[in-house]
Amino acid sequence: MFSWAAGTEIAIWGTGRRARKFFLRYRNVFKVKFFIDNFPTRKKMEGVKILHPKEIGGVERSIKTVIAIEDYFDVCRQCCDLGMRFFFDYLPYDLVEFNSINLIRLYELLEGKNVKEYLKMIMHDRAYAVLIGNCQIINIKRMLLGSKDFQAQYIMIDIPPVYAITESMAESIEASRYVFEDCSLFVTQHISRNNGYISFLSTDNIKSLMRENAHMVVIPTLYCDLYFPQTVHQNKRNELLKEVGVTVFPYGDFILNELAEKYSIDEIQRIVKWDNLFSVRLLQWHFRTAVTQMLERESKCDVTISDYILENFKKKQLFYTKNHPIESVFYELGVRILCKLGFEHDRVENIRLQRLDSCQELIYPSVSKFYNFAFQKELYMDSLFDEECSIDEMVRMYLVCLDQDSKAWGSAGDEG
């Protein structure tokens, strides 16, 4: 969708890669009159003149300006200083032609002023959808926007995944009640009020804000701990890893935690490969419990996927961690969501998704033997060095990075 009508006369602020891409893509949609550059190194590009901002003071106001620079906030402020008005005189490139609008970025651009009015002008009163969820919602958004039918009916109002919402973001979201009150479609994972980030986005609260003819589709959180009976809450942190922005182990491992109290790293590396490390009785109990919890979570959803997981989890590894699924799980969920919404879904598997393999949990040989997996898990992605590593290397890294006070840390088995 375009904010401005086809044939509008525009200037493109920028002469770099983003500006060139915008020019090549839209020069037949808009009439490009000139480029603007704070530090021009030539007079023309593609036969179109390049002006310094000082030269545009007398330019006809009907010529609108597209800010075609990746980090465009400073240039937007410069446009304001030149007396230009948001939407009427200038827009960032990602609001000129769009299928989604980043709500937080819009608040930052407008410094929280008149956001509701500008949002309505940009969208031309089109129906819009809001997606609410965790890290998985990014891929679900991509699949929905990959449907031409969906794009024809809805614009997406983009808000961050719940876990990534900061205090300032929460304030902007809560100040945007009108977005949720006027929304036509909500696609949301079931979010509890005590989610620890923002209770405003809880499913119950959103339901209370919905207008009568709005539609809500509650989808499951893709979650499966059948591969990982050792998973516990991660209460250990390595400050150095935190400083470099690496989350190698988002979950704790009670097996490694307990073994580290008594054994060296070399000994632990041997122990974890025992094919009877977990008893059959424990794994049977874990299977029943995990399936019961999965079905209980899905009882609150309008779309389900547990049947697909239970049918396929032995054939191939479906999850890297208990809430980081592989692409085929996303594709299956995408098909089911689009079917529920009444849209075509034949292109879902052609959509490029974000891989969630940077964090991985161990699949113990004991677990593999119990389920008789059709696949063998030998290598794991190491997000610290961005390469694959063995189970021995995973064990060593876990103990060194997250269990530094244990017997294993600094033992003879950890030399070198």
Image (tube, rainbow, N blue to C red):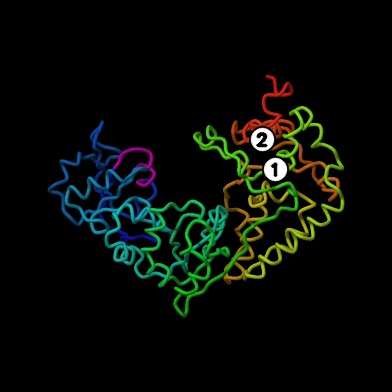
Please state which of residues 247 and 143 is positioned toward the viewer in this rendering.
247
The span from disc 2 to disc 1 (Cα, nearest Å) is 9 Å
Query: Looking at the rendering, which quadrant does residue 35 occupy?
Result: top left
Which image quarter is the C terminus in? top right
Query: Residue at left 54%, top 59%?
Result: 195
> Is residue 15 a member of the stretch shown in magenta?
yes
At a point 63% along the width and 41% down the height, the residue shown is: 249
Q: Against 39, is 76 above or below?
A: below
Q: Which residues are magenta?
A: 14-23
Callout 2 secondary element? helix
Residue picked out by circle 1: 253
Amino acid type shown at disc 2? Tyr
Q: Quadrant of the N terminus?
A: bottom left
First along the sequence among labels 2 and 1: 1
Vertical arrangement, residue 125 with respect to residue 48, above or below: below
Residue 330 occupies which quadrant of the picture? bottom right
Q: Which mark is residue 398?
A: 2
Rendering coords of residue 380 (x, y %): 69, 37
Q: Are marks 2 and 1 in contact (CB under 8 Å)?
A: yes
Q: How many marks?
A: 2
Residue at image point 68% right, 48% down = 232
Q: What is the quadrant of residue 220 in the picture?
A: bottom right
Assign a secondary structure to mark 1. Answer: strand
Residue projecting furthest to the left: 58
Q: How many residues crowd around disc 2 within 10 Å: few (fewer than 14), some, or many (20 or more)?
A: some
Q: Is residue 30 left or right of residue 191?
A: left
Q: Which mark is residue 59?
A: none
Q: Which percent across, then down, holds residue 93?
A: 35, 50
Image location (x, y in percent) of residue 206: 48, 70
Which residue is at the far bottom?
Answer: 212
For residue 208, side relative to residue 377 (left or right) = left
